[in-house]
Image (tube, rainbow, N blue to C red):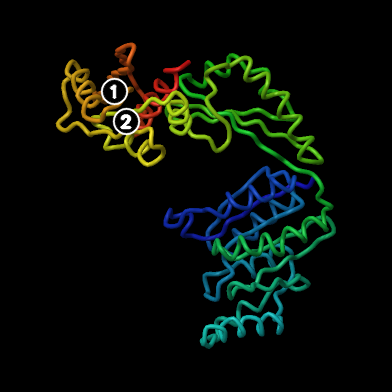
């Protein structure tokens, strides 16, 4: 399988003024086609630095994809930078200029002289018509490689990636394989505990197993390379079965399944309605549950926050006012170095209280608290 690198171009990206969504899109598109992506980089609008990073990528990869810097202004240097990296000149392409003028005419506009710059591409490059924008793309080939330059506007880049670039890559590099991921979601357990149980699986080469820790939950990603999707599924299934045997109920879902969705589905299965009250969470728990299922009876934000010892009474009152069978109350109590979560869970059979402490970044404490609350609800019927 060929190796690819992505280079996003734009000083606005380095300054944090614009969020780079192009890398995410291109990476997922390449993954689905079986292309290995080992590196991505961002560079500002500087011709020399862009040329340097392209040369570095060419020493490692067969496919180099750049986005951005194809506009009509002086600070759009990608065309010249690619030419510099490959030691060629840029050349005017009349057919690209005609395409650009046609785009402007479509909207009853007239291109300016600087738009003419967009019809210049590196000598010998393959011009790619941009039928949804004014910035043509291009591909310049070497014996082993393809350097592909796409517009930075996401909707234009995505359209060209699907309609022009992927068909080209499939033919040029005989792409037949697939890279398929599957993500297992866990809650109620830390990354180190999971690693202690599946560490040997993280050393596999195909499929690979990796983890991503979040506040109150950990994702386990299984990624398989194969010639077809059924073959990839078979590789994933074998490893997934081992992980499930080792982690058991810590796993709550896969791929697009959410913790709140799993909770509400389980309560609906047993026909149990839910109400919640929260304090010092700014409505985060309510927003995760509201509108997702008719099993959610509603909730309240307690303001001012009660004392921890008064939280059970507030939960009982919420159960009565919302006529719910399951009620949960939670309050996050701030501290100088640690934050404390007080939780009360009321069911028809029992009343339980929990206290958990959090010592991570304070800004992540509310999300951690909400995920922990949902995990307690998830385990009611287990």
Query: Circle 2: is it few (<14), some (14-19), or many (20+) Cα within 10 Å?
Result: some
Question: Image height check: is 80 above or below 236?
Answer: below
Q: How many marks?
A: 2
Residue at left offset 50%, top offset 29%: 213
First in sequence, mark 2 or 1: give its number: 1
Residue with the mark numbered 2: 362
Judge left or right: residue 275 versus residue 33.
left
The reply to whether discs 2 and 1 touch (Cβ–Cβ < 8 Å) is yes
Please tell me in which quadrant of the rendered image residue 71 appears.
bottom right
Q: Can you give x and y, in whole percent of width and height, for residue 255 in the image? A: 58, 36
Q: Is residue 46 visible?
A: no
| Residue 230 appearing in the image | yes
The residue that appears at 55% across and 61% down in the rendered structure is 154
Q: Pinpoint residue 328: horizontal percent, then vertical percent.
A: 30, 23
Q: Secondary structure at mark 1?
A: strand
Q: Secondary structure at mark 2?
A: helix
On the picture, is 199 further left or further right than 329? right
What residue is drawn where x is 64% and y is 74%? Answer: 131
Position of residue 187 in the picture relative to residue 288 (left or right): right
> Relative to 135, does residue 287 appear above or below in the rendering?
above
Residue 28 image point, x, y percent: 64, 47
Q: Provide the residue designation for mark 1.
A: 339
Left or right of 149 in this view: 2: right
Placement of 22 over or under 301, stated as above or below: below
Mark 1 crowd level (few <14, some 14–19, many ≥20, 10 Å Cα): many
Q: Quadrant of residue 222?
A: top right
Question: Residue 251 location in percent, x, y?
Answer: 54, 23
Q: Is residue 278 above or below residue 73?
A: above
Q: Quadrant of the N terminus?
A: top right
The answer for how far apart the CA atoms under marks 2 and 1 are is 8 Å
């Amino acid at each position: 399988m060929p190796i690819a690198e992505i280079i996003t171009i734009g000083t606005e990206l380095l300054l944090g003024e614009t969020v780079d969504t192009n890398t995410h899109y291109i990476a997922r598109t390449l993954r689905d086609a079986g292309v290995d992506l080992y590196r991505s980089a961002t560079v500002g609008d500087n011709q020399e630095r862009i040329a340097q990073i392209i040369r570095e990528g060419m020493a490692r990869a067969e496919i180099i994809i750049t986005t951005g810097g194809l506009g009509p202004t002086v600070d759009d240097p990608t065309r010249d930078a690619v030419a510099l990296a490959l030691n060629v000149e840029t050349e005017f392409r009349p057919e690209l200029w005609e395409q650009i003028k046609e785009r402007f005419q479509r909207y009853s506009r007239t291109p300016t002289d600087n738009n003419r710059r967009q019809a210049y591409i590196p000598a010998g490059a393959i011009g790619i018509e941009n039928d949804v924008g004014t910035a043509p793309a291009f591909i310049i080939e070497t014996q082993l490689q393809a350097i592909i330059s796409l517009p930075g506007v996401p909707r234009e880049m995505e359209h060209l990636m699907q309609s022009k670039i992927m068909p080209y890559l499939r033919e040029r590099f005989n792409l037949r394989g697939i890279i398929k991921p599957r993500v297992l979601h866990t809650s109620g357990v830390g990354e180190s505990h999971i690693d202690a149980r599946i560490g040997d699986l993280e050393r596999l080469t195909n499929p690979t197993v990796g983890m991503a820790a979040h506040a109150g939950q950990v994702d386990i990603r299984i990624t398989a390379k194969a010639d077809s999707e059924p073959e990839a599924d078979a590789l994933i299934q074998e490893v997934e079965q081992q992980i499930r045997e080792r982690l058991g109920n810590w796993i709550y879902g896969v791929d697009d399944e959410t913790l709140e969705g799993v909770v509400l589905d389980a309560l609906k299965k047993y026909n149990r309605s839910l109400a919640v009250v929260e304090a010092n969470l700014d409505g985060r728990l309510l927003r995760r549950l509201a509108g997702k299922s008719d099993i959610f009876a509603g909730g309240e934000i307690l303001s001012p926050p009660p004392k921890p010892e008064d939280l059970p009474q507030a939960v009982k009152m919420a159960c009565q006012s919302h006529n719910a069978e399951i009620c949960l109350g939670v309050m996050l109590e701030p501290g100088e170095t640690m934050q404390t979560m007080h939780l009360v869970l009321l069911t028809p059979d029992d009343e339980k209280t929990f206290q958990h402490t959090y010592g991570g970044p304070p800004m992540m404490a509310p999300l951690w608290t909400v995920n922990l609350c949902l995990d307690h609800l998830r385990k009611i019927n287990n």
